[in-house]
Image (cartoon, rainbow, N blue to C red):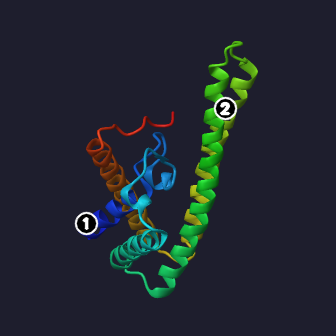
Amino acid sequence: MTRTLSIAALAVVALTGVASAQRGAPLAVQRGAGRVAGRGAAQQLPPAQRQALARQVRQAFVTVLRQQLKLDNGQVRRLMQTRAEFDRQRRELNQGERQTRVALRAAMEDSAGPDQQKIGQYVDQLVQAQHRRAALLESEQKELSNFLTPLQRAQYLALEERFAKKLLEAGQRGAGARGGAPPPPDR
């Protein structure tokens, strides 16, 4: 199981580049929240090969989920649908948060002097994003509770955290091999 997770994590890093997780939220919440710090080797593959690699990663992750959580086909299907929907929402949230951080940095570095009101608005927006992230996790857990037992939900969260940790570790090893360090966390 660990080997399958490791292979899947390495393949994802190769597919998407080096990801770094944000600090402050549990890794399970951060799925998709990291910044890409360079091109992975797979980014230079033809689209068909990239898609095949992505399919292999998904299949490996589903295999681990099915084995560890003892899921039937219906549960796997619902889990993957739920995961896809909440991942989409997380990506949108993360994109808005990144835009707010860029705007905040620009406001803080404004040569005409910092606009305290704008800076305050951006900070408030970042706090609101954290509230939306927590609400999204709560909504996801409610949806999962419709077809997973509490034990399965706990195991799923643990698997996600292990997978995210392996992604982060593999990404840091990849950055070191390229002579760079992982990017600083978004804080």
Q: How many marks?
A: 2
Q: Nearer the viewer, residue 3 or 140?
A: 3
Find numbered disc 2 in the image and state the secondary structure of the residue it sits on. Answer: helix
Task: Give how far across and how far down residue 80 sits, in percent.
Answer: 52, 74
For disc 2, the marked residue is: 103
Q: Which residue appears farthest toward the right when viewing the image?
A: 117
| Label 1 Cα neighbours within 10 Å, binned few <14 / some 14-19 / many ≥20 | few
Position of 159 relative to 90 (above/below): below
Q: Which residue appears farthest toward the bottom when viewing the image?
A: 73
Q: Nearer the viewer, residue 116 or 11?
A: 11
| Label 2 Cα neighbours within 10 Å, binned few <14 / some 14-19 / many ≥20 | some
Task: Give how far across and how far down residue 86 sits, in percent.
Answer: 59, 63
Q: Is residue 110 left or right of residue 163?
A: right
Q: Is residue 164 left or right of residue 88?
A: left
Position of 136 relative to 47 (above/below): above
Give the number of the disc on residue 21: none
Position of 158 relative to 61 (above/below): above
**Residue in the image at 68% along x and 31% along y:** 122
Compare marks 2 and 1 and give the one earlier in the sequence: 1
Task: Give how far across and how far down residue 127 sits, in percent.
Answer: 63, 37
Q: Residue 64 sits in which quadrant? A: bottom left
> Quadrant location of the N terminus?
bottom left
**Residue in the image at 45% along x and 37% along y:** 185
For disc 1, the marked residue is: 2
Position of 115 relative to 176 (above/below): above
Task: Give how far across and how far down residue 139 sits, in percent.
Answer: 62, 61
